[in-house]
Image (cartoon, helix red, strand yellow):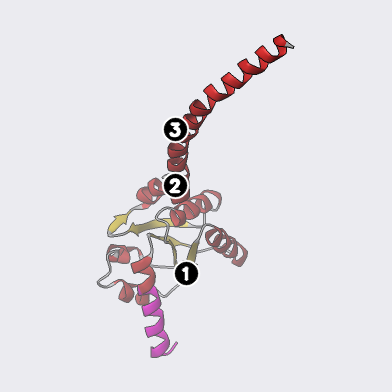
Amino acid sequence: MDRAQKEKVVEELGQIFESSGVVVVAHYEGLTVAEMQDLRARMREAGGSVRVAKNRLAKIALEGKPCASIADYLTGMTVLSYSEDPVAAAKVVDAFAKTNDKLKVLGGAMGDSALDPAGVKAVAQMPSREELIASIVGCIGAPASNIAGAIGAPASNIASILSTIEEKAA
């Protein structure tokens, strides 16, 4: 890799560290190619990405970034998992690590907050953005449907009373 390629990688990693809601660092030593492809597919499905980069280049890219505290985790064979959704990458990595003991979560960062392995697990248990939006919409929609039902109920009651009177009269 020549200097221009290294500079490009550092720039790409810098953008990842700035724009991601969460970055998870893990050791992947011993993972097969098929297992790594499975992790990448799961992450893509959740809206995140997986990146393997030289630790030295990643440390350079971290300088001056809010999540610079994860530089200590960048030793050995590391993989970076990240997503804009602050929970998605942590959920996928945590679920994958439960089924595959070769992936060891070292820690991560959520904004400027450093996460240890327990912190990554805690973030993974939080509801995702879509789940939160769905629950908020459900809370907002429930009273509206109750109001519509209450407004419509007297009209339907009157209609049923009139139809009953009409049947008796006939």
User: On residue 133, which mark appears?
Assistant: 2
Magenta span = 1-14
Q: Main secondary structure of the magenta part?
A: helix
* On screen, residue 101 above or below 83: above
Q: Residue at x 32, y 63 (%)?
A: 70
**For the residue labelled by badge 1, is the local secondary structure a helix, a strand or a loop?**
strand
Q: Residue at x 42, y 42 (%)?
A: 136
158 and 68: which one is in front? Answer: 158
Q: Which residue is mark 1?
A: 51
On the rendered structure, is 3 left or right of 44?
Answer: left
Q: Are marks 3 and 1 in contact (CB under 8 Å)?
A: no
Q: x and y percent of residue 11 in the render?
A: 37, 79
Local packing at callout 2 (Cα closer than 10 Å; few below 14, some 14-19, many 20+) is few
Which label's residue is closer to the chain start, 2 or 3? 2
* On screen, residue 7 above or below 116: below
Q: How many marks?
A: 3
40 and 147: which one is in front? Answer: 147
| Quadrant in the picture for the C terminus | top right
The CA distance from mark 2 to mark 3 is: 16 Å
Q: x and y percent of residue 141 in the render?
A: 47, 38
Residue type (three-letter) at the residue carrying disc 1: Arg
Residue type (three-letter) at the residue carrying disc 2: Ile
Outermost left residue: 64
The CA distance from mark 3 to mark 1 is: 45 Å
Label 1 vs label 2, nearer the camera: 2
Q: Which residue is mark 3?
A: 143
